[in-house]
Image (cartoon, rainbow, N blue to C red):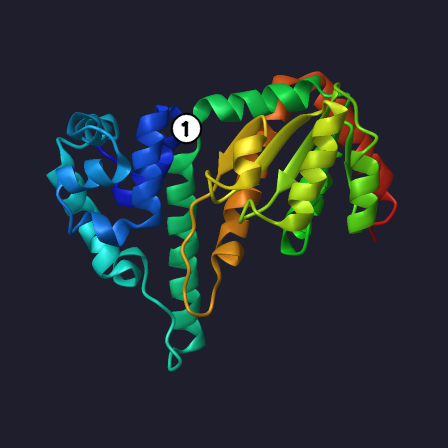
Amino acid sequence: MAQQGLTGIRSHYPRLSEKEKKIADFILEHPEKIVHQTISQVADQLEVADATVSRFCKRIGYKGFQALKIALAPEIIAPNKMLHEDVNDTDEAKIVAEKIFQSNIRTLENTLQVLDKAELEQAVTFLLEARRVEFYGFGGSNMVAMDAYHKFVRSGVPAFAFPDAHLQLMSASQLTNQDVAFIFSHSGASKDAYQLLQTVKKTGAKTIAITGFPKSPIGQQVDVALHTSSEETDYRSEALASRIAQLSIIDALYVTVIMRQKEKAQTSVEKVRNAIAATKM
């Protein structure tokens, strides 16, 4: 069964051919145009054959262009009503909580659909084989980076994170080809995060990123890109909504790493528990 509309396109994106990605990019950037165009109009605009557009539709799970348009229409005409109920000024606190919880649930469901199995496995391999793993994030993303450090420091994987932007850059410059840089950037276009990535690439270190935009500069230049899919409301930005998805991806990677090296991880976790035991009353 095809994953619905834009989410389905994002899910298939990593496995598309270059021409198919060209079509996917156009739809993701201008979904409102698709429902009002014929297959020939889309093909002419993108300078591809009608058959290429048709194959793209079938590749992502639809019988043809018309079926894709039907799937996209509800998202374009009334996206907020389809994805979630938006928060209203007059809502009671409990109603707001219910709507936010439902939005978080949908964010997690959509992210699970767009996560690529091969990319996840490659990320796990990088983490297991790393001499050193550093987690990077700027602004709100730094909180996610620090949470990732808080988890992985228990796993036996040599993990590090820094709250200061200059310290992040300084440390990144000292990485080697045996290390892994893990970058968090919802937009994938943060100037600070992009500058850091360029610094890392000079060291030869392997790179992983979690971002909400496959076409972003960071998403396209890292070795492994893991994508989130979130919704935006008047009171809650996509970046905020995506944070719970980023944290969940980190949880999944952490648990997988723990499972893949049980003895080492158990020893490390025990050391952490003993170290902090004295701090408890």
Look at the numbered disc 1 and give the secondary structure of its residue. helix
Residue 96 located left or right of residue 264: left
Q: Residues within 10 Å of mark 1 (few under 14, many from 20)?
A: some
As drawn, 243 above or below 15: below
Residue at horizontal 42 percent and vertical 41 percent from the top? 111
Please tell me in which quadrant of the rendered image residue 178 appears. top right
45 or 4, nearer to the observer: 45
Residue at the image position 20 percent from the left and 37 percent from the top = 44
Could you say where residue 30 lies in the image, as x and y percent from the top left? 30, 50
Along the viewing direction, whichever of 104 and 137 lies nearer the viewer: 137
Q: Quadrant of residue 95?
A: bottom left
Residue with the mark numbered 1:
14
Query: Residue at 72% of width from left, 22% of height from top?
Result: 204
Residue 69 in view (yes/no) = yes
Residue 88 relative to residue 43: left or right: right
How far from the left and from the top, in percent, is residue 75?
25, 54
Picture quarter with the N terminus: top left
Q: Nearer the viewer, residue 123 or 256?
A: 123
Residue 157 lies, in percent from the top left, at 74, 26
Q: What amino acid does circle 1 point to?
A: Pro
Q: Position of residue 25 (x, y in %)?
A: 36, 40
Q: Quadrant of residue 147?
A: top right
Left or right: 167 with respect to 13? right
Q: Is residue 87 above or below residue 38?
A: below
Left or right: 99 in relation to 190: left
